[in-house]
Image: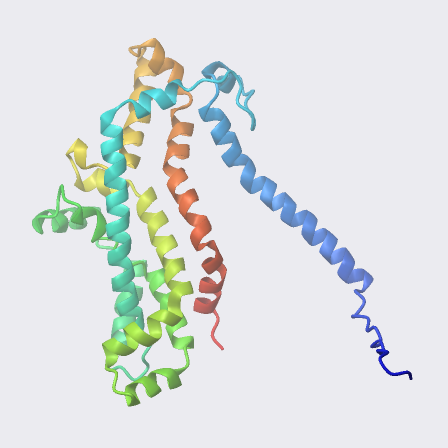
Amino acid sequence: MTLGTKREAPKTRGPVDSRGYRIFRIVNTVVLIGVVIVTLYPFLNIVARSLSDEAYILAGKVSIVPRGFDVTAHKLVMSDSLFWTNYRNTLVYTVVATLISIVLTTCYAYVLSKPQLKGRGVLVGIALFTMFFSGGLIPNYVLVTSLGMKNTIWAVVIPNAISVFNLLVMKAFFESLPTELEEAAAVDGLNTYGILLRIVLPLSKAIIATMVLFYAVSFWNSWFTAFLYIDQQDLLPVTVYLRNLIAGATDAQQSGAADADVVQAAATLQAVTIVLTTLPILAVYPFVQRYFVSGVMLGAVKG
């Protein structure tokens, strides 16, 4: 071999996919594309309906492309100052409720993840009991009213502050963390709160982001709690506002008492409702989507 020449390394071939595996990949790709189409079509249909003329909707001619472009329903909803007040309420309720839920769920799950805790079984049993049994609508209403929370933000954010499903997922995640990390932190002088804040939480970004998404979507879409405990129009969330708008337009159309604009928009109000209430969640989801799969899997699978 002459000086300065380089000897080429022999090329290695990777494993060749079998025929069965190639067929599986093709079938899997086709199935997943079908799932995407089935999932995406209803949403595109709703958007098209919200921008279409009532006559085309009633005739069943609207698929995923708007027909007879009409934004009357959007104008009716968005021209009302009460709509923006209720929209602001929804933002405030969602942010406050999510923060409270994350703090309570994290603390409760961290406690339950400690097998040496005395009374741990009782605390788990209390959580599981509330998952299957409820006090009922009337007792809950009496309790919230007697606590002075009616017509306040606390009537919306406190009763559903902890989801037992989310609690169990986060508990499983904390149990999967190496105990050696906490033991080393304790040797270095950190107390329980220091370990949670400086060791556990920085390692739990994925599960916390997942729980934030779960809670935010739940509180954003919730309307019955506010409908039950809030009587003042300026304190209602936007979901209740739009629910009342749909009900009012439908009743007016059936009774023949509606004006032309309301009748024209009646067939699209439900579509407008869905579009307006899902846009903020759709805007937030891409920022937490990368944590979603890892957070759920780490919280559900141990080892």
Position of 134 compared to 58: left or right? Answer: left
Q: Is residue 10 above or below residue 261?
A: below
Residue 44 visible (yes or no): yes
Residue 136 visible (yes or no): no
**Residue 285 position within the rendered picture, expressed as x and y whole percent measured from the top left:** 43, 49
Position of 257 compared to 264: left or right? Answer: left
Q: Identify the residue at the far bottom of this view.
A: 187
Q: Residue at x 38, y 53 (%)?
A: 213
Q: Residue at x 32, y 84 (%)?
A: 185
Q: Residue at x 27, y 28 (%)?
A: 244
Position of 185 compared to 58: left or right? Answer: left
Q: Is residue 127 above or below residue 41?
A: below
Q: Identify the residue at the far front of this view.
A: 3
Q: Identify the residue at the far right of this view.
A: 1
Position of 187 compared to 56: left or right? Answer: left
**Residue 23 position within the rendered picture, expressed as x and y whole percent measured from the top left:** 77, 56
Quadrant position of residue 130: bottom left
Query: Is 57 or 186 nearer to us in this picture?
Result: 186
- Name the image colouring: rainbow
Q: Is residue 118 above or below residue 260?
A: below
Query: Is 286 or 45 nearer to us in this picture?
Result: 286
Q: Residue at x 54, y 23 (%)?
A: 62
Q: Is residue 92 above or below residue 274?
A: below
